[in-house]
Amino acid sequence: MVGDKGWKKWLVISFFLLPNFIGFLVFIGIPILTSLGLSFTKWDLLSTPEFIGFDNYKGIIEDTEFWSALKNTLLFIIAYLPTVLIIALGIAMLLNKNMKGRAFFRAAYFIPVVSSWVAVSLIWKWLFNPTYGLVNYFLSWFGFVGPDWLQDPQWAMIAIVLTSVWKDTGFVMVLFLAGLQNISETYYEAAEIDGASPIKKFLHITIPLLTPTTFFILIISLINSFQVFDQVMIMTEGGPAGSTTVLVQKIYNHAFRYFEMGYASAVSWVLFLIIFIVTLIQNRLQKRWVDYEQ
C-alpha cells in the first residue's frame, strides 16, 4: 500500500506532468487517431466525411504515382544516407584532433543545421540556377558545362540530395564526434605498440567502437529521410515530370491541393508502417553488428 507521503509524491509528479500530457494528447494523440479514422473515409474538408472502408488503401495499391513517389523516396535515401555518413565521419575525425581553430570549425559546420530549411532551400535553388548560379559558374572553371539542375529529371534529385547533405552534415558530425571522444585512447596506444597502421586502427578500433553511434544515426536519419519534404517543396515542388515527388509531397498534394483528406491520411499511415517496419528490421539486425562493449 502507498502511504500518505507516497500519494503526495505522485500528486506532485502528476501536477508537473499534466500540462505536457494534455499538450501531447491535444496536439499529437488525438490528431493521430483522427487521421486513422479519416483514412477509412472520403472527405474533401467541406462536406461530411463518408465512410468507404478500405477503398483508400486499395487505391494506394493501384496508384502508380504512389509507387513512383516511394521509388523516389528510396532513391533519395540510397544517395543521401551513405554520402552524409561518410562526409560527416571524415570531418568528425579531423575535428577530433588537436588543431588550431577547432572550436570555430565545429561551430561553422553546425550553422547549416540551425538554419531554416526554407532559407537553405531558397539559397541552393539560386546556387543551382543554370544561368547565373554559382555551382555551374564554378564548374565552368574546370571546363565543364553544368546541367539545368532543377529542371532536368536526371539531375533534380541529385540537387536535392546535395542540399540535404550540406545541411545535415553538421548534425551527424556532432554525433560522430561525441562517439569518437567516447573511445578510450588506450586502444590506440596498444595498437601503436603492436605496430598497427592508421588504416588498421581505423578499421579495427574506430569503426567497431563507433557502431552504437552509427546505429543511432542510421535510425534517426532513415526516419527523417522517409519524411523528406521541405527542400523538395521549395526547390522543385516534386518536378520536373514527377522525378522528385516523394511520399510526403504526395500526402501534401492530396490533402491540400486535391482536397482528398481521406486518401492523404491513408498514404500517411502507409508511410508510418513503412518507417515502423524498417526501424524494426534495423533494431533486429543491430545485434549482428553493433558492439556496445568498450
Image: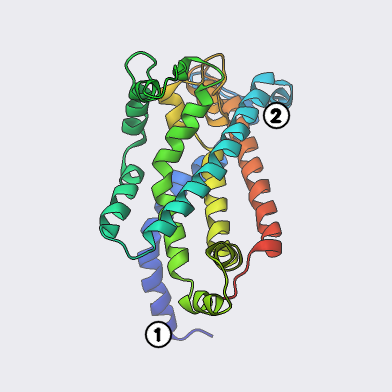
Which image quarter is the N terminus in?
bottom right
Can residue 36 be seen here? The reply is no
Which image quarter is the C terminus in?
bottom right
Viewer-nearest residue: 285 or 59? 285
The reply to whether callout 1 and callout 2 are in contact (CB within 8 Å) is: no
Determine which quarter of the picture holds residue 223: top right
Is residue 128 depicted above or below 204 in this figure?
above
CA separation in Å, label 1 and label 2: 52 Å
Residue 197: percent from left, percent from top: 55, 67
Report the residue marked by disc 2.
57
- Tell me the kind of residue under disc 2: Tyr
* Picture residue at 42% right of the left edge, 52% below the top: 91
Report the residue marked by disc 1.
5
Residue 270: percent from left, percent from top: 65, 36
Q: Earlier in the sequence, mark 1 or mark 2?
A: 1
* Picture residue at 70% right of the left edge, 57% below the top: 285
- Tell me the kind of residue under disc 1: Lys
